[in-house]
Every structure is written in structure tokens, then in C-alpha cells.
Amino acid sequence: MNVNRLYAVFKKRRFAPKFKKNMRTDRTFTMLKPDAVEKGHIGAILEKINAAGFKIVAMKLTQMTTDDAKEFYAIHKERPFFGELVEYMTRGPIVAAILEKDNAVEDFRTLIGATNPAEAAEGTIRKLYAASIGENAVHGSDSDENAAIEGAFHFAGRDTF
Ligand code: UDP
Ligand code: MG
């Protein structure tokens, strides 16, 4: 058994379950996407986020580069919409934020609604502000692990409160 293999077994047995167990469940990551910013919906969307009980622990107006968007959405790189998604997400500023609340990931996905606004529940952010399945106003992390990865992609520790 070589060193790398030994390390993999050790990591799996000793660290991975511990890491999962200690994974925080009270944070998610969001972006108010370029269409929402262009249409002047920042205030209205933040209002809904606050009203739903999320605390903003990091926030900034920023613009993703093409490399940023390709990396952020790497999981979708084989999908037919990947090129359009990267174009869209880089065409103007976004609001990136880390949000805190119990059960943050799931509750935020409920608040934003289905990816396709035509299928989103009444009162959800995407139902109210999204134009289409592509330009759907807002991002929400899909797991605690991705929330941590995506938050760290945009914010240094000292910019998170
Ligand atoms: N998207 C798209 N066409 C699709 C599915 C998704 O343009 O058929 C875009 C859309 O902006 C979506 C993003 O790709 O928000 C990421 O897709 P995902 O399936 O992860 O949806 P989400 O998690 O954002 O609801
Ligand atoms: Mg997703």
C-alpha cells in the first residue's frame, strides 16, 4: 500500500465523517444575478430575504470574470446551457452574500422557488422577479458543503461576520 492510498484510507476513516458531522447547517450563499441588479430589484429581494429571517453575514456588489463563472458553475460544464450561463453571469454586477439562519440551505431554496420561474411557487423570489429558467434572478446553494465552498469563493474570512 503506497503513501497516497494510506492517506486516502486515513482521511476517509478519520476526517471525512468528522468533517460532515461538524459541517455547519446555518449558512447559505446567494447571488442576486445580473438581471435582478439591472432591473433595480436589489432592495426588494433583500427585503424578502430579511423578512424570511436570514441574517446577512457577508455582502458585496461585484462582477464575475469569465474564469470565475466557469469555475463557479463547473458542475454544469457539459450542459447545453453552459455557454449562455457564463455569458449571463458575467455581463454585469451581481450582489454576492452569505446568509445565516437555522436550516439555511433548504429554507433559502424554498424562499427562492424552482429554477424555472414558471414552476416556482407563488410569492417566491423567482416567481416575483425571474424572467426565465436562464435569467432567474437569484442563486441559492444546494447543500451545506457547497454553501461553504461558494461563500469562500467570494469572501475572505475577515469579510464574513
Ligand atoms: N440554467 C439554465 N437552463 C437550464 C437550467 C439552468 O440556463 O435548463 C441556469 C439557471 O440560471 C440556473 C443555473 O443555470 O439557476 C444553475 O442551474 P441549477 O440546475 O443548478 O439550478 P439552481 O440550483 O440555480 O436552481
Ligand atoms: Mg444549483
Image (spheres, helix red, strand yellow):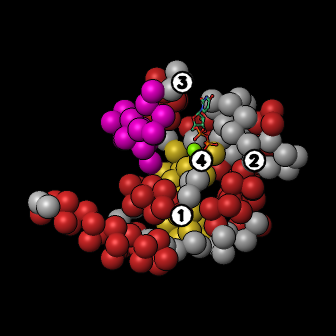
Q: Residue at x 51, y 53 (%)?
A: 96
Q: Residue at x 41, y 77 (%)?
A: 18
In the image, residue 155 lies in the stretch drawn in magenta: no
Secondary structure of the residue carrying tag 4 is strand
Q: Residue at x 55, y 50 (%)?
A: 31
**Residue beneath disc 4:** 139
Q: Is residue 2 left or right of residue 74?
A: left
Instruction: Tally the numbered discs.
Output: 4
> Mark 2 or 1, which is nearer the eye?
1
- Say whether marks 3 and 1 touch (CB < 8 Å): no
The quadrant where residue 156 appears: bottom left
Q: Quadrant of the N terminus?
A: bottom left
The quadrant where residue 81 appears: top right
Q: Position of residue 38 (x, y in %)?
A: 61, 36
Q: Position of residue 109 (x, y in %)?
A: 69, 54
Above-or-below relation of 72 to 160: above
Instruction: Say what amino acid the circle numbered 4 marks.
Output: His
Q: Is residue 118 left or right of residue 87?
A: right
> Mark 3 or 4, which is nearer the eye?
3
Q: Residue at x 39, y 35 (%)?
A: 70
**Residue beneath disc 3:** 81
Mark 2 Cβ inside 8 Å of ligand 1 = no
Q: Is residue 93 left or right of residue 67?
A: right
Residue range highlighted in magenta: 62-78
Instruction: Say what amino acid the circle numbered 1 marks.
Output: Asp
* First of labels 3, 1 by sequence position: 3
**Residue beneath disc 2:** 113
Instruction: Say what amino acid the circle numbered 3 marks.
Output: Phe
Secondary structure of the residue carrying tag 3 is loop
